[in-house]
Amino acid sequence: MKHLDHLFKDKKLKKIIDGQKPYRLSRSKNIHLDLCNSIMSQQLSTKVAEIINARFIKLYEGEPSPERIMNTSTDKLRSIGLSNAKASYLQNVARFALDFGMDHAHLDKMENEQIIEYLTQIKGVGKWTVEMILMFTLGREDVFAIDDLGIQQSMAKLYKLDSRNKKKFREELLSISDKWKPFRTYACIYLWRWKDAGALQNKNKPKATR
């Protein structure tokens, strides 16, 4: 695979990729729904997030359209275990999708940074959340989630970096990741997998669904 040939030039990264199943990015049809799922999953364990997401889908007996989400009362959304804030954020996503557009035809013509700027206009949607959408919904190959704790912890261990000086640490992360272009998304995924396999032992796992 083309991305592996490129990432293997980084010998340290190659060591953790060896033995992992090659990853293939895919694209999801319903961008608004993936964004809602990402919001619902924030600060929850994977198991709890799956339960909440299943309850959400059951509310609509199938995949809900933006219209149906926007017309669902906050109380009904809270009944599946969402906070008042998260229920409001889901309606914000639905309203934005209806008012401004959030389908592939609309987003595919934008660069990554343009999409981040576009979707973070929605109250409740942050940069990290949009980066996950770029990776796992839009299938963008060159996204570096520098603010993700799991990525920071993995790179600190793999490259023996000192994270105490935040500015220097961030510069080092960017410098290393520059070598992975244009396949930084794949590098992030292999780093997450490495972490999830226990490489960091007692550290908290990232909450992105992969």
Image (spheres, rainbow, N blue to C red):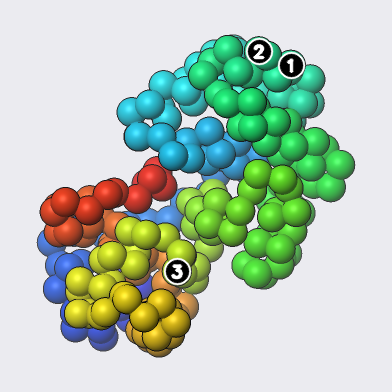
Front one among 45 and 38: 45
* In the rendered image, the vertical position of residue 51 relative to residue 23, given as above or below: above
* Placement of 145 over or under 38, stated as above or below: below
- Read off the residue under disc 3: 146
Disc 1 is placed on an element classified as loop
Q: Residue at x 29, y 49 (%)?
A: 205
| Residue at screen point 36% across, 80% down | 165
Q: Which residue is drawn at the image coordinates 22% and 53% (left, top)?
A: 203
Residue at the disc numbered 1: 73
Please name the residue that numbered disc 2 is placed on: 76
The residue at the far front in this view is: 164
Residue 174 position within the rendered picture, expressed as x and y whole percent measured from the top left:
43, 81
Q: Residue at x 55, y 24 (%)?
A: 82
**Which residue appears farthest toward the right when viewing the image?**
99
Mark 3 Cα-neighbour bin, 10 Å: few <14, some 14–19, many ≥20: some
The answer to whether the residues at label 1 and label 2 have Cβ atoms under 8 Å apart is yes
Q: Earlier in the sequence, mark 3 or mark 1?
A: 1
**Can residue 109 be seen by looking at this rendering?**
yes
- Tell me where residue 80 appears, x and y as whole percent: 54, 15
Type of amino acid under label 3: Ile
Reading the chain from its start, which is encountered first: label 2 or label 3? 2
Residues at marks 2 and 3, CA–CA distance in whole angstroms:
36 Å
How far apart are the alpha carbons under marks 1 and 2? Answer: 5 Å
Classify 10 Å Cα crowding around label 2: few (below 14), some (14-19), many (20 and above): few
**Circle 2: element type:** helix
Q: Quadrant of residue 66?
A: top right
Q: Can residue 29 be seen in the rendering of this structure?
A: no
**Amino acid under label 1?**
Ser
Q: Which mark is residue 145?
A: none
Which three-letter amino acid code belongs to the residue tagged 2? Lys
